[in-house]
RNA sequence: GGUGGGAUAACCAAGUGGUCAAAGGAGGCAGACUGUAAAUCUGUCGAGCUGAGCUCUUCGGGGGUUCGACUCCCUCUCCCACCA
């Protein structure tokens, strides 16, 4: 029996309702993964994670290797035990840091040489290192080392990054086999690169498919390009990925973007948006995001979103605004609970509508309300 | 009673003859944030005009010197310190 089973497909789009089995449990898809880069979803405890309905969280190879070190985590019983989270964990490879810490790195065929953003020490991350670290962390889903192109990017440069990503993917697969990753039921996902070029996206997806990995990701999106271009890249890659494997779009997106990518056949997502915006005072509502720092919430006794039930919605906008304005740390926790719940709840509804067979009309109406609400506030 | 120090934008605080509507901070109001070097960053905050810009009113009160004063002089008021 496969680790990925598709239960239902949407009659009006390429969306599908499926489930992905990992050593720490089954993930119902479409799924949103909370980002816990440094072995914590900022401001939340594992109890909160369960409460908001998290099925799986993402953590990061680069950061955990720098501090506290993957060997230590392994000694202490692995990442799950270390952080007190017993459900699945996906670890990002550090490939994205190639992009986001670009001033501190040098890329060669062997891998990436970083200057630590913490103390400037030089560190090397190649395919083998990257897999070894993720194996030590004990992640359920490891990611291959990839090279994320900046935006904009010349076709030739994008091709080179793509070629390197494909070579590294094969090396990562070998390393993962050697580490016994697959034997223990853990997964390795390859990553499609190719920047904004549909031909590269298609080629990359087609050339990665024969590796026959447990899943495929679409990377290098939402790095500054306009939304239509981002969705076009997802579509270009997704249509050439194996139907029977999970597809994970890395690092996105806004709620409407998630629904649109589901329609393009994407199954998994992760994004810092709900937690970061929470820390910056923004809360998600069915009518678009609101900035609680705004004066209009000063005396508002209503909850952020009356249609949603979570720990935070018992409080008034006025109270939450007060916490944000006063710089209280509880503001971070409460708003993160709400925002993460908002995203996870959206995925739950999407799954329900996929099962009911009315995903496309539902998603269209949902986006219309969200985007009209946001627009109404702007005017 | 004497001597010295001080009063700057609704708060703190620089400036000490023109480049000052006046640094900086705090605070207010808005904006950004998409595989987290982010509880971060950006803009804006005397008034009026839609505005690059222009006009008007500001540095305790009053008077003076000067082409020109937040900056110099006189005086008054209030605060602070020390001496009586």
Image (cartoon, coloured by chain):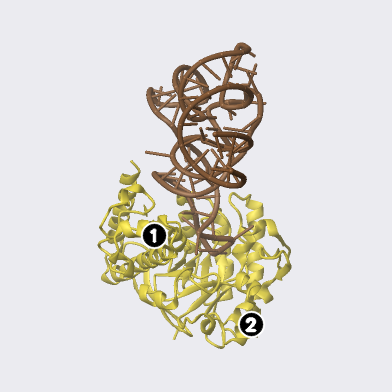
Q: From the viewer's side, name the closer residue of A155 and A38.
A: A38
Task: For chain A, give the colour.
Answer: yellow
| Residue B54 at x, y percent in the picture | 49, 18
Determine whether the residue tagged by mark 2 lies in a helix, strand or loop. helix
Q: Residue at x 63, y 76 (%)?
A: A68
Residue highlighted by disc 1: A323
| Residue A288 at x, y percent in the picture | 34, 54
Query: Are the residues under badges 2 and 1 in a single subunit?
Result: yes
Residue highlighted by disc 2: A72
Task: For chain B, give the colour.
Answer: brown
Q: Residue at x 64, y 62 (%)?
A: A98
Q: How many marks?
A: 2
Q: Quadrant of residue A37?
A: bottom right
In the rendered structure, the answer to whether residue A120 lies left or right of residue A254 reads: right
**Alpha carbon separation for disc pair 2 and 1:** 37 Å
Q: From the viewer's side, name the closer residue of A345 and A230.
A: A345
On screen, residue A140 above or below A365: below
The chain that hosts pointer 1 is A
- The local crowd at label 1, few if under 14, some if 14 to 19, many if 20 or more residues have their Cα within 10 Å, is some
């Amino acid at each position: 029996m496969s680790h990925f089973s598709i239960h239902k497909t949407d009659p009006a789009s390429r969306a599908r309702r499926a489930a992905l089995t990992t050593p720490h449990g089954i993930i119902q898809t479409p799924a949103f993964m909370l980002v816990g880069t440094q072995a914590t979803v900022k401001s939340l405890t594992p109890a909160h994670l369960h409460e908001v309905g998290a099925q799986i969280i993402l953590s990061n190879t680069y950061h955990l290797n720098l501090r506290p070190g993957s060997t230590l985590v392994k000694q202490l019983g692995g990442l799950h035990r270390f952080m007190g989270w017993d459900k699945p964990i996906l670890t990002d490879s550090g490939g994205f840091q190639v992009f986001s810490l670009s001033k501190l790195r040098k890329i060669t065929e062997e891998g990436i040489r970083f200057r630590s953003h913490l103390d400037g020490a030089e560190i090397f991350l190649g395919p083998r290192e990257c897999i070894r670290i993720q194996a030590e962390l004990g992640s359920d889903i490891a990611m291959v080392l990839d090279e994320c192109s900046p935006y904009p990017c010349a076709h030739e440069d994008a091709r080179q990054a793509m070629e390197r990503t494909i070579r590294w993917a094969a090396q990562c697969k070998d390393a993962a086999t050697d580490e016994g990753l697959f034997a223990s039921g853990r997964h390795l996902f390859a990553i499609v690169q190719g920047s904004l070029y549909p031909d590269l996206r298609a080629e990359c997806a087609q050339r990665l498919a024969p590796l026959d990995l447990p899943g495929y990701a679409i990377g290098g999106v939402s790095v500054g390009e306009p939304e239509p271009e981002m969705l076009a890249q997802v579509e270009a890659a997704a249509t050439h990925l194996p139907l029977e494997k999970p597809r994970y779009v890395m690092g996105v997106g806004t709620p409407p973007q998630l629904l649109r990518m589901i329609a393009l056949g994407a199954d998994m997502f992760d994004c810092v948006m709900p937690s970061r915006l929470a820390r910056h005072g923004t809360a998600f509502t069915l009518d678009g995001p609101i900035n609680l720092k705004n004066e209009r919430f000063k005396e508002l006794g209503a909850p952020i979103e009356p249609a949603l039930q979570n720990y935070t919605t018992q409080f008034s906008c006025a109270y939450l605004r007060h916490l944000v304005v006063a710089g209280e740390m509880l503001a971070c926790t409460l708003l993160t609970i709400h925002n993460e719940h908002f995203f996870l709840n959206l995925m739950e509804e999407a799954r329900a509508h996929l099962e009911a067979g009315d995903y496309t009309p539902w998603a269209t109406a949902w986006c219309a309300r969200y985007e009209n609400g946001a627009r109404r506030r702007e005017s």
